[in-house]
Image (cartoon, rainbow, N blue to C red):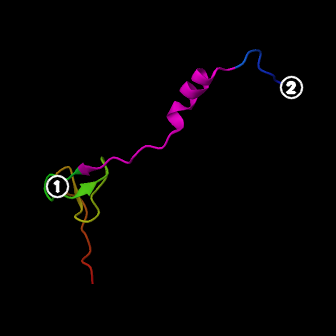
Amino acid sequence: MAVPKKKISKSRRGMRRSHDSLKQPTYVEDETTGEFHRPHHVDMKTGFYKGRQVIEVKEKI
């Protein structure tokens, strides 16, 4: 059975766990419409990506 040779300090344990925390999702503002969307994703409301329209958006009924 594997047993640690020395105790891991609270500081070292905390440094290891520092990347486990939840982070807020980032959003960027579209230059053409002003809508917020995820970076490097198509804005699904308008169909724009990097200032040009890449998909056709269906009209709501």
The x, y position of residue 18, in whole percent, is 51, 31
Q: Residues within 10 Å of mark 1 (few under 14, many from 20)?
A: few
Q: From this view, report whether residue 40 is shown above or below residue 58.
A: above
Front one among 57 and 35 = 35
| Residue 32 falls left or right of residue 17 | left
User: What's the CA distance linking mark 1 and mark 2?
Assistant: 60 Å
- Which of the numbered marks, if any, corresponds to residue 52? 1
Quadrant of the frame with the C terminus: bottom left
Amino acid type indicated by mark 2? Met
The x, y position of residue 5, in whole percent, is 77, 15
**Residue visible at 14% across and 52% down in the picture:** 31
Could you say whether the residue bearing mark 1 is in a helix, strand or loop? strand
**Residue visible at 19% across and 53% down in the picture:** 30
Q: Residue lying farthest left?
A: 32
**Residue visible at 16% across and 57% down in the picture:** 34
Q: Which residues are magenta?
A: 8-28
Q: From this view, report whether residue 26 is shown above or below residue 32.
A: above
Q: How many marks?
A: 2
Front one among 22 and 35 = 22
Amino acid type indicated by mark 1? Arg
| Residue 14 falls left or right of residue 54 | right
The x, y position of residue 3, in whole percent, is 81, 22
- What residue sits right under mark 2 in the picture? 1
Could you say whether the residue bearing mark 2 is in a helix, strand or loop? loop
Q: From this view, report whether residue 8 is shown above or below residue 35.
A: above
